[in-house]
Amino acid sequence: MSKENIVEVQNVSKTYKKRRQKEFVQAVNNISFDVKKGEILGLLGPNGAGKTSTIKMICGLLIPDEGTILINGRDNQKNRLETLRDISAVLEGNRNLYWRLTVRENLEYFAGNRGMDKKGVAQTIDELLVQFRLRDKENELVNRLSRGMQQKLAIAVAMMADSQVLLLDEPTLGLDVETGYEVRELLKEIVNNQERTIIISSHDMAVVEDLCDRVIIINHGRIVTDDHVDNLLRLFAVRSYTITLGQLLSDQQLQLIKKAFPHLEYIPDTTQAIIKVDFDQDHEIYDLFELLKMNKTPVESIEQGTINFEQVFMRIIKGEEAHALV
Amino acid sequence: MRWFSLLRVNLQKEYIELVRYLPNTIATVFTFYIIFLGMFLGIQVVGDPSTQELNTQYVIVNNLFWFLTMSTINKVGWQVTNESMRGTLEQLSMSPMGIWRIMTARLIASTVINFIILIVLLYLSMFTTGQWLNIDLLSILPILLITLVSMYGLGFIIAGISMVLKQVDAFLQILQFILAGLAFVPVTVAPIISYFPFVKGLDLVRSVMIHGVTLSQISVTDYGILIGNAIIYFVLGIAFFMFCERIAMKRGLLAHY
């Protein structure tokens, strides 16, 4: 084991049997990755990609069919209770709480169930209530809180454990824009002020782009991409171009160009036209210019595209790009 | 210390729910009291007048034990089902204490808190019938404590089944009648049921409360069965629960939402 790695997922697979059917679903298919101490990792993927199964296997709540998961160098199945000391998680947000208990009672209850004594946690609870802006709601029943507050409390409960690794499964799912932003800001504070290792699974690209150092994209149970967020944005941006032409393309020319670049977007105007294109390889830009030169089509401007993380994600998932960190 | 924290928070939770949802608590006491009244009136109307007093005393003790089994064994089944649907069972399963320790703490906490209701129900029943039983705590408590251990074993088995089976509601409904059967059928009618969890304990408690038997008058065989039941059912219960936990973790059943 590398000394820096706190989580090591090695050749892990998981299959579920469909209810009342003989069919099986491969949720996770032979995935391997490491997470370094203090790293913030984003797990992305469409619904059913295998993100939650992966997170639950890291938490020791789901036993893999094959492969091993090491937490701080210890197998999380062979040493389950020991490894659980290093891990806490928010799996279903507000569903992880007791709705008939108050905010403070929930924090005390989960702390006690981890074997933490009352005096020792009292100060931590007070600090968390302030940090999560729940101080004035500490005696409120959870079922009377807003969804956003419940979500914040679920994260506070996980923070209470003071574990080295924090797993957050869809921390902003189902929240309105304003509350989602508030939770995101809160997570930013946690990321910036603490040295915890955090694994976040999310559909919310803003969460991943804002918080994560590195991202793993899972699709159909396999890792499609494992890279740093900045690298992915840079990689896709340099290959995305918008070219303005001084005249319209001829039919023959357009046919040839479309044949060479099937995903190219051609937007004709009365006297001008715009081409939007993403190149898989850097040299392809020259191939396009060769085709434009055929009819001496004037090029008025070339702009390198700006791209956000959501577009990167969509392109990867659509199979337009499969880039893996070497 | 960690065990103490575990027990403390679970006791606290049980107490909070008992007080905060007082109408529910009162309704529970009322339900068991109504059932008791039904049985008491039945004895009055159709019972043999020569054994009326004794039968009433039996019904008081049996009804209390039925309440105790329902509020510990059956309740833990419902709790596991509800918590797996809510999502809190997964959160508890992530405790480094282990879910079986949390369940043990819950069973103990539930028993302690339900004793308050049990005492209310006992005195209410005795007051209604005018039958004042022998409350010899020095004899009752040791028997009861050993009996509770076997009861917890059965509680673990029910919790394990509830964890693995998704549609366990019907089973839990039937279970309450099985528990009633075990609580109400006298050991003399079917001696084999002595080997069922809690039945021997109930029989001995009945002997103390109705016939005034003391600990020194109980035979070695009876102690053997009582203690043997406690050890066997508790160990069996925990082993079965851990087996079910493993199945649940293999199949992803800790959450049913």
Image (spheres, coloured by chain):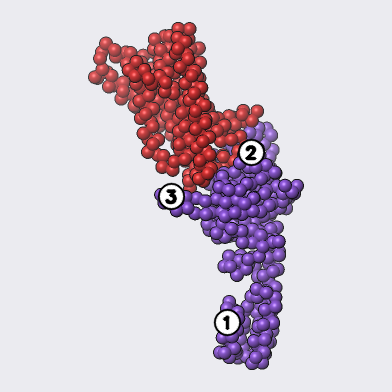
- Residue at x 44% of width, y 23% of height: B197
Three-letter code, disc 2: Asn
- Residue at x 25% of width, y 14% of height: B48
Q: CA distance from mark 1 to mark 3?
A: 46 Å
Which disc, if any, is residue A30? Answer: none
Residue B255, relative to residue A290: is it above or below? above
The chain coloured purple is A
Please name the residue that numbered disc 2 is placed on: A79
In the displayed image of the protein, which residue is found farthest to the bottom? Answer: A295
Determine whether label 2 and label 3 are within 8 Å by CB.
Answer: no
Q: Name the foreground residue: A13 vs A55.
A: A13
Q: Is residue A191 visible?
A: no
Residue B80, relative to residue A197: is it above or below? above
Q: Quadrant of residue A79?
A: top right
Is A305 positioned to the left or the right of A23 in the image? right
Q: Label 3 marks which chain's residue?
A: A
Residue B123 spot, x, y in % from top left: 41, 19
Please name the residue that numbered disc 3 is placed on: A19
Q: Earlier in the sequence, mark 2 or mark 3?
A: 3
Residue B35 spot, x, y in % from top left: 34, 26
- Residue at x 41% of width, y 30% of height: B28
